[in-house]
Amino acid sequence: GAGVSQTPSNKVTEKGKYVELRCDPISGHTALYWYRQSLGQGPEFLIYFQGTGAADDSGLPNDRFFAVRPEGSVSTLKIQRTERGDSAVYLCASSRTSGNEQFFGPGTRLTVL
Amino acid sequence: SQQGEEDPQALSIQEGENATMNCSYKTSINNLQWYRQNSGRGLVHLILIRSNEREKHSGRLRVTLDTSKKSSSLLITASRAADTASYFCATDPTSGTYKYIFGTGTRLKVLA
């Protein structure tokens, strides 16, 4: 079956703009994770969903970041008033349930000019 | 804060040799996972080892877990050029949620 997909693959935006990043998890996977990865670093946890609810959003850096998963499948990460420091690769992963192996998407490379 | 740290940061070996990478973490965990990331973006899951397990094998991969020392190791035997990648450990602290904390990674280069 299809793996985790993320769109867009690349996003270039200007400082101060709003962006949305989309993640389509593997069908039937109830857990969905968002990470951010800067060059030379490991993925940094942002938020994870179990079903429709955010089970842990402690990794969101500030209130400019928000994520939703309204129907328990597709998720959108929303960033308001983007800053240059938000530039990174945003990774999404899903797993059958929480605590199992995660399947990662290819990521969205966000560049804030 | 960084939960896991891999050691060494970089490793260069000849094809056919074994590669060992270590991961240390700070708090009690439910499980620990190892991932590989080739240049590019996607991470590939390698092995999950639970806190009550001490060793797991998958093909040429062997993972050990020592919860008393809060450390894990990943051994790749008979390495191939295709094993060139960054390797990360991810831990799942027993904090009541399943947020995973990744280490800084080991960059492995296998020379043909």
Image (cartoon, coloured by chain):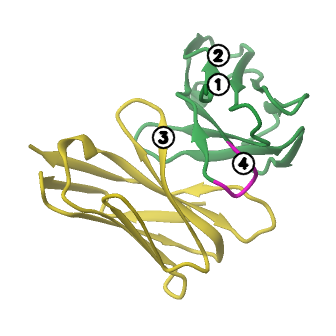
Chain colours: A green, B yellow
Residue marked by disc 3: B43
What residue is drawn where x is 62% and y is 11%?
A14
Q: Quadrant of residue A16?
A: top right
The answer for which chain carries disc 2 is: A
User: Dot 1 lies on which element?
Assistant: loop
Which numbered tag is attached to residue A83? 1
Q: Quadrant of the N terminus of chain B?
A: bottom right
Using the image, name the chain to which the residue with label 1 belongs: A
Asked which secondary structure carries label 3, the reply is strand
Q: In the rendered structure, are the residues bearing label 1 and label 3 in contact, judged by CB atoms less than 8 Å apart?
A: no
Q: Residues within 10 Å of mark 1 (few under 14, many from 20)?
A: some
**How far apart, in angstroms, are the residues tagged by discs 1 and 3?**
26 Å
Q: Residue at x 18, y 43 (%)?
A: B81
Separation (CA) of disc 1 from disc 2: 5 Å
**Percent position of residue A49, x then y:** 81, 43
Q: Quadrant of the C terminus of chain B?
A: top left
Residue A51 position within the rendered picture, expressed as x and y whole percent measured from the top left: 86, 41
Magenta stretch? Answer: A95-100
Q: Is residue B69 magenta?
A: no
The local crowd at label 3, few if under 14, some if 14 to 19, many if 20 or more residues have their Cα within 10 Å, is many
Distance CA(mark 1)–CA(mark 4): 17 Å
Question: Mark 4 sits on what residue?
Answer: A59
Tell me which label, 1 or 2, sits earlier in the chain.
2
Mark 2 belongs to which amino acid? Lys
The numbered mark, 2 or 4, whose residue comes first in the sequence reads 2
Q: Is residue B84 visible?
A: no
Q: How many marks?
A: 4
Mark 4 residue type: Gly
- Residue appearing at x 59%, y 34% in the figure: A91
Q: Which mark is residue A15?
A: 2
